[in-house]
Amino acid sequence: MQSVNLRSFKQKVHHNKKAFKRFLGKLEKNPPKNLDAVAEIIDKEVWKEVDCLTCANCCKTMTPTFTAQDIKRIATHFRMKPKEFKEKWLEFDKKAGDWMNVKQPCQFLDLKTNMCSIYEVRPADCAGFPHLAKKKMKDYLHVHQQNVEYCPATFKMVERMMQSEYVW
């Protein structure tokens, strides 16, 4: 497993972004019957190559959505009331209808180690990210269209799917 070079990754994204989005859009409109099985195989290959702790780009550039359960669980972890937790670290995005981080990078990310200080109680959105091998992959293709810009694992997965003889 090699370290993620974010500069190189961003260059690759810039070069491949349109092709990836076209491919994922096409896949969404006409998914092959074996899409979930292919995603599961490629997911295992990708995680042999990508180490999130050498990257943490998601935590540096994105914000998870915090569900009511997330807020309660994390507030309890800090021995706070959910209202106090929201006032200290979150803002409500009226357009999306979601609670999100006030700042980026995430306030719970240790920038020296790329480790999450609340990993055991992190939001469900973080725990599931980048959602590569979800069942009903078709329902997550729009998510991958967004995440391909932020996540080297998603990038590698889409790249492999484009090259895969199993998808077509």
Image (cartoon, helix red, strand yellow):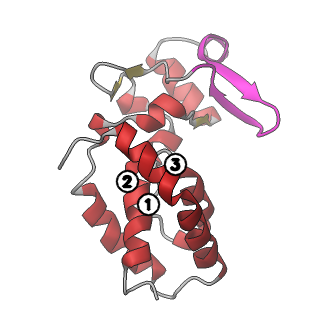
Rendered image: mark on residue 100:
none
> Which amino acid does the dot numbered 2 rest on?
Ala
Is residue 35 visible in the rendered image? The answer is: yes
Relative side of 52 to 29, left or right = left
Q: Nearer the viewer, residue 5 or 140?
A: 5
Is residue 140 visible in the rendered image? The answer is: no
Identify the residue at the far right of this view: 95
Q: Identify whether 80 is placed above or below 114.
A: above
For mark 2, does the 10 Å Cα neighbourhood hold few (<14), some (14 to 19), or many (20 or more) residues?
many
Q: Position of residue 127 (x, y in %)?
A: 43, 43
Rendered image: mark on residue 149:
3
Q: Which residues are magenta?
A: 83-103
Q: Position of residue 67 (x, y in %)?
A: 62, 37
Relative side of 11 to 41, left or right = right
Disc 2 to disc 3, C-alpha distance: 10 Å
In front of the other: label 2 or label 3?
3
Q: Residue at x 36, y 22 (%)?
A: 117
Callout 2–callout 3 Cβ contact below 8 Å: no
Disc 1 to disc 3, C-alpha distance: 14 Å
Residue that mark 2 sits on = 153
Residue 162 location, quadrant: bottom left
* Numbered circles on residues, count: 3
Q: Earlier in the sequence, mark 1 or mark 3?
A: 1
Q: Residue at x 50, y 42 (%)?
A: 124
Q: Position of residue 77 (x, y in %)?
A: 44, 19
